[in-house]
Image: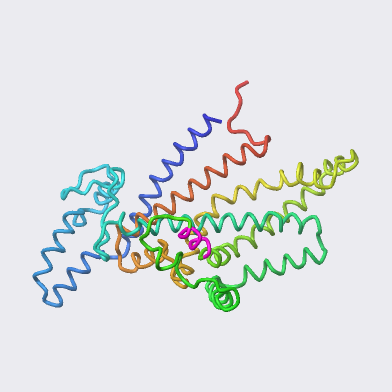
């Protein structure tokens, strides 16, 4: 297992390097960047006194260099002329639109994004797992039809519409908070039990909204896997040997049916992060989603590049985690070929 972990970690690092190059060159495909657009605007409006400052920032972050050289400097493997050291050296860059360092811009939004999406992942698995199993065991019953109907509603309803509905009825009938991830009096304050309680209360609606579509899809996938396993001969054998209903479902078919369910972890994390961008805007959530959207629109390349790279990193971590869980879950999966 240790050998497999080392190999997968090295492969993940190589993949992340390739992804970083793709991200950097793709976000630079549109002509210009924030600084060059700002310089053109300053020249058009006759604000010559501010051009020197914009040119200084352009040189400081090597935005006047060829694109391949900009990438190496951004990555941190080549020295920048103005002293910018790059990602590998721990310098994330500068947001030209917000006039702050990237680390300062995403500081709070990064961990809040992780909290929101971790809650959504837990919601998806906590609901989809029992729902998929019950739907398979009670196939073609009213329970199965009701679960399928609710699932299709979840898939068909746009997340932003579901967010608006839950915000309205949650506030009117359950007195749930609207917008944000904590009460205003806790913003900028150190973590405490009251602040944690406020965050958990504010997480209820975003968690349900973001996790609904994933829950519907995964429960139906698990149902299909379970139905396939329940028809296998070993289930009939376990029944003939007198195994209890719970044991012959949980011990054997569920364990085998979980393989694709676990494998979806690698795709679920980035899907939730990218899918929550619009929800964050609608619900005024202080996550990195709205920041990414604004950075892409304004061509703030250093900021948008790091956020996209972070999402890619989440994808690779999810895939590594799913591979490890699959190797532990199913003894039929081998981490490497044995020498004869």
Left or right position of 274 against 82: right
Residue at figure coordinates x 18%, y 48% from the top left:
83
Residue 170 location (% of width, % of height): 57, 74
Q: Is residue 198 magenta?
A: yes
How many numbered discs? 0
| Residue in front for this viewpoint, 146 or 111 | 111
Left or right position of 87 against 216: left
Magenta part mainly helix, strand or loop?
A: helix
Left or right position of 320 against 329: left
Q: Is residue 325 above or below residue 68?
A: above
Magenta segment range? 194-201
Q: Is residue 273 magenta?
A: no
Hey, which residue is sitting farthest top in the picture?
340
- Quadrant containing the N terminus is top right
Residue 163 location (% of width, % of height): 54, 72
| Residue in front for this viewpoint, 102 or 156 | 102
| Residue in front for this viewpoint, 203 or 163 | 203
Residue at figure coordinates x 41%, y 46% from the top left:
16
Query: How is colour applied across the structure in the image?
Result: rainbow
Residue at figure coordinates x 60%, y 41% from the top left:
325
Residue 82 location (% of width, % of height): 16, 50
* Residue 80 visible to an observer of this rendering: yes
Residue 330: image quadrant is top right
- Quadrant containing the C terminus is top right
Residue 296 location (% of width, % of height): 35, 65
* Residue 32 visible to an observer of this rendering: no
| Residue in front for this viewpoint, 327 or 105 | 105
Q: Is residue 256 above or below residue 280?
A: above
Hey, which residue is sitting farthest left in the picture?
49
């Amino acid at each position: 297992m240790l050998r497999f972990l080392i190999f997968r970690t090295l492969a993940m690092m190589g993949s992340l390097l390739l992804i970083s190059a793709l991200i950097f060159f793709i976000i630079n495909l549109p002509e210009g960047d924030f600084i060059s657009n700002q310089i053109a605007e300053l020249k058009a409006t006759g604000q010559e006194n501010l051009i020197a400052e914009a040119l200084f920032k352009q040189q400081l972050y090597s935005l006047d260099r060829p694109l391949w050289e900009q990438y190496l400097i951004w990555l941190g493997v080549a020295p920048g002329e103005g002293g910018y050291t790059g990602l590998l050296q721990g310098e994330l860059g500068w947001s030209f639109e917000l006039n702050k360092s990237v680390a300062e811009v995403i500081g709070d939004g990064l961990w809040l994004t992780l909290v929101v999406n971790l809650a959504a992942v837990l919601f998806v698995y906590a609901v989809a797992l029992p729902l998929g199993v019950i739907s398979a065991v009670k196939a073609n019953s009213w329970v199965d039809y009701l679960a399928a109907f609710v699932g299709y509603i979840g898939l068909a309803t746009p997340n932003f519409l579901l967010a608006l509905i839950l915000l309205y009825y949650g506030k009117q009938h359950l007195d749930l908070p609207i917008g944000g991830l904590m009460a205003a009096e806790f913003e900028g304050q150190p973590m405490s039990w009251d602040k944690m309680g406020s965050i958990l209360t504010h997480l209820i609606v975003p968690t349900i909204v973001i996790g609904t579509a994933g829950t519907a899809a995964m429960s139906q996938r698990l149902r299909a896997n379970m139905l396939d396993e329940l028809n296998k001969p070993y289930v009939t054998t376990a029944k003939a040997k007198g195994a209890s209903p719970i044991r012959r479902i949980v011990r054997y078919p569920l364990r085998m049916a979980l393989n694709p369910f676990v494998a979806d972890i690698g795709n679920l994390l980035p899907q939730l992060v990218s899918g929550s961008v619009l929800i964050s805007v609608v619900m005024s959530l202080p996550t990195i989603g709205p920041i990414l959207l604004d950075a892409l629109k304004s061509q703030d390349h250093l900021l948008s590049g790091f956020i996209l790279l972070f999402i890619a990193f989440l994808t690779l971590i999810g895939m590594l985690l799913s591979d490890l869980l699959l190797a532990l879950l199913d003894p039929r999966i081998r981490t490497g070929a044995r020498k004869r």
